[in-house]
Image (cartoon, coloured by chain):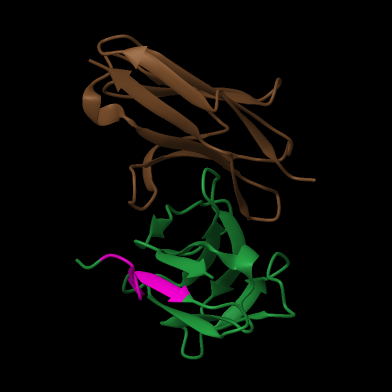
Chain colours: A green, B brown
């Protein structure tokens, strides 16, 4: 079974340019997460989707970041315009979904390493 | 706010010895505490988890303990091997169903 797929794996752009990341979750996983991981730190949640609905985007910098999951499967995270401080690894994860008190394991993708020059 | 403190930030142990990583969390309503291992340049992977209805869980050389009263949980790795070298993250699910990660512990195993 294929895991979470992300592309591209690496991206180098100049500041003020736009950039987009793509994620394909594990088949059947209703919940999708986007995280940002700075060097030497743990992942920080940017946005969480339950199917196509963004249920937690409180940590997403909405002035420059946007995300979508139109059909409840693939998702795209966009930054426009990018700033130097956006350099990080952007991780996508998916899980079966939360049901009551059941916590489902999150499976992470390989991440996209973004470098903003 | 919701946060988890993880210690130490780096840990070096002799191969065969034990390693212990400790975390303290802020949200008393938390019920689920996973631990992730991230090798250099790779994705985080779940290695063990514990729910609030138990105080300890063991899986071969890895164990996790939970003290809900003190809001502490710890990862124990016994008989460490070179392949245990990685960054380990503790985490908890906040009452808002959001996972909060610790800052990580870089574990090095000395031959």
Residue that extends furthest to the left in the rendered view of this protein = A1
Q: Please, is residue B94 above or below residue A46 in the view?
A: above
Work out whether residue B50 or residue B37 is closer to the camera in this orientation and state it.
B37
Is residue B106 rendered to the left or right of residue A1?
right
Q: In this image, B28 relative to A114: left or right?
A: right
Nearer to the camera, B111 or B20: B111
- Image check: B45 left or right of A33? left
Q: Which image quadrant: the C terminus of chain B? A: top left
Q: Position of residue A7 (x, y in %)?
A: 35, 76
- Is residue A93 on the magenta stretch? no
Which residue sits at x=49%, y=82%? A20
Task: Say whether residue A7 is magenta.
Answer: yes
Residue B42 sits above or below residue A29 on the image:
above
Quadrant of residue A110 in the image? bottom left
Tell me where the magenta segment starts and ends, as one range: A3-12
Name the residue at the right extreme. B1
Write the residue at 34% across / 51% down.
B41
Question: Residue B15, how many percent across, how many down?
Answer: 26, 13
Residue B68 in the image: above or below residue A87? above
Residue displayed at 63% across by 55% down: B98
Q: Residue A55's spot in the image, x, y percent? A: 65, 72
């Amino acid at each position: 079974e294929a895991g979470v797929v992300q592309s591209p794996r690496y991206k180098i752009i100049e500041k003020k340019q736009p950039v987009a990341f793509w994620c394909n979750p594990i088949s059947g996983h209703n919940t999708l997460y986007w995280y940002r991981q700075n060097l030497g730190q743990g992942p920080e949640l940017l946005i969480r989707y339950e199917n196509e609905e963004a249920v937690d985007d409180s940590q997403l910098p909405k002035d420059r970041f946007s995300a979508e999951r139109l059909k409840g499967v693939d998702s795209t995270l966009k930054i426009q315009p990018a700033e130097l401080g956006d350099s990080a690894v952007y991780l996508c994860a998916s899980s079966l979904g939360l049901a009551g008190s059941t916590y489902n394991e999150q499976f992470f993708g390989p991440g996209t390493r973004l470098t903003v020059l | 706010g919701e946060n988890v403190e993880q210690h130490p930030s780096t840990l070096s142990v002799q191969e065969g010895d034990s390693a212990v990583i400790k975390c303290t969390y802020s949200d008393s309503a938390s019920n689920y505490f996973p631990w992730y291992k991230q090798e250099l340049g790779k994705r985080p992977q779940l290695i063990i988890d514990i729910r609030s209805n138990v105080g300890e869980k063991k899986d071969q050389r890895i164990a996790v303990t939970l003290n809900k009263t003190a809001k502490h949980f710890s990862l124990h790795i016994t008989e460490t091997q070179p392949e245990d070298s990685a960054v380990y993250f503790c985490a908890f699910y906040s009452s808002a169903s959001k996972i909060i990660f610790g800052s990580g512990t870089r574990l090095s195993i000395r031959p």
